[in-house]
Image (cartoon, coloured by chain):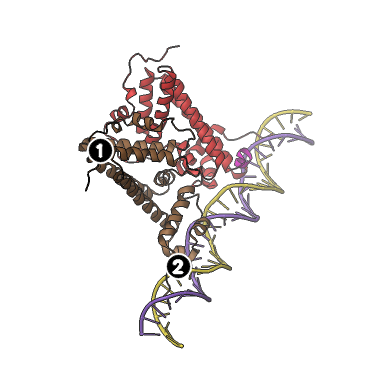
Chain colours: A brown, B red, C purple, D yellow
Amino acid sequence: MAIKKFDMDVVLEQAINTFWQYGYHGTSMQQLLQATGLRPGSLYREFESKEGLYLLALSRYAAATITTVNNRIQGSSSVIEGIKSILLDLFEEAKAKNYCGCFLVKTQLELSAHNESILTNVSEEFAKIEANYCAILNTIFAPEISLQYAKQLMLIIFGIRVYSYQSEQPEDVEEFILSILPWLKDDSNHNIKQG
Amino acid sequence: MAIKKFDMDVVLEQAINTFWQYGYHGTSMQQLLQATGLRPGSLYREFESKEGLYLLALSRYAAATITTVNNRIQGSSSVIEGIKSILLDLFEEAKAKNYCGCFLVKTQLELSAHNESILTNVSEEFAKIEANYCAILNTIFAPEISLQYAKQLMLIIFGIRVYSYQSEQPEDVEEFILSILPWLKDDSNHNIKQG
DNA sequence: TAACATTTTGAACGTTCATTCAAAAAAATA
DNA sequence: TATTTTTTTGAATGAACGTTCAAAATGTTA
């Protein structure tokens, strides 16, 4: 029997990048074939349809998002510093030439009227991301406070994701963040637990 | 000579609703013809193309947005109360069955990679909206504070617009808003200037 | 009423869309 | 080497896309 020529990870990454940039309806199969290097037959045998490929790309993106967050927290001197650096990173990302925002957000806005299952899908991913932030905050705050702060964090992140399309950023981004989320100022005794 | 049968205002409103819900690429000319009641020839004679109709719909939506904001402020007992009610309205809107978010935001996210002129266009509209908030805040705050608060307001509004797709809202929405924008708590001596 | 200018009509156009499938190629197994 | 199983190939398909335009209808002006 023949063996697969393509690397699934690479193909999905190319698909993510294309969908992420141009959106679902704005991406043609032609573009996907070119981006992935696959031929129509192979792509359809593997992913069944454009939508099938999209859903796989989307869930992979969502999983990577959570991993990135957790790595950033682990790599920081404290939870608070970690969260701050995540938010600052979002502003930095926005300076890139082909800034694409957040793939999940774009999906939510583009497809909520077309495909209810995708809306549910994305909402679940966001719930996971919020729950992950909540768990992180729980290591330094009381449970009910963590729930509240996680919600704030999600809303602010959505705000940054959209606001960043504007060319002008706040002068002092860190000050801007701290003024909206004042609890990020309090960084006493919140070191990451080791081992 | 023949006279126009259709009402431009009505046609544009239908076009806005259709584009707003399904997006630019997700809306077909068939849908637009059905929604507006126009025939292909008439639509193309009047608007030149799908993109032409879209741009007109978009700028009309943006103008209406600013009008709505200003009416809300004028109809409130104070600037602070007005802004609070605008934010609370956004959360209320989100409860509607066919919640569509913000047409400008959706446009920005969907078309930024396809059409640079639309990106510029939308950015300019957002700049106008931010400037309008800034002018409103200027009636009760110092200029540099108003600039800062207007930016915060825009980011929070973007956040609400996206976060609202999630089915679960914060328990006490007003408390939620006040915790992110604490300056909305200070409502002393900020009455709307009369006549 | 005749001439004119404007708008409406809707069938038809060429293009691009997502998708299919029979045939060829490729590797593993017998 | 022959057989079997899986993958690749890429031309072809029908549907849907945005758009056009000559002819008919409409109402104003001469």
Q: Position of residue C7 (x, y in %)?
A: 64, 37
Residue carrying label 2: A5
* In the image: residue A148, left or right of residue C2: left
Asked if the magenta segment contains residue B39, the reply would be no
Q: Is residue A155 visible?
A: yes
**N-terminal label among 1 and 2:** 2
Q: Which residues are magenta?
A: B42-48
Q: Residues within 10 Å of mark 2 (few under 14, many from 20)?
A: few
Closer-to-camera residue (A185/B103): A185
**Label 2 SS:** loop
Residue designated by label 1: A147
Q: Is residue A165 above or below residue B174?
A: below
- Real-space Cα separation, disc 1 to disc 2, in angstroms: 46 Å
Image marks 1 and 2: residues in contact by CB distance under 8 Å: no
- Residue B150 is situated, as x and y percent measured from the top left of the image, at 42, 26
Which residue is depicted at the point 49% across and 63% down?
Answer: A40
From the top left corner, tell me how far across and down residue B141 is, in percent: 40, 18
Q: Is residue A89 left or right of residue C8?
A: left
Mark in front: 1 vs 2:
2
Residue at x-position 36% and y-position 21%: B80
Q: Amino acid at mark 2?
A: Lys
- Amino acid at dot 1: Leu
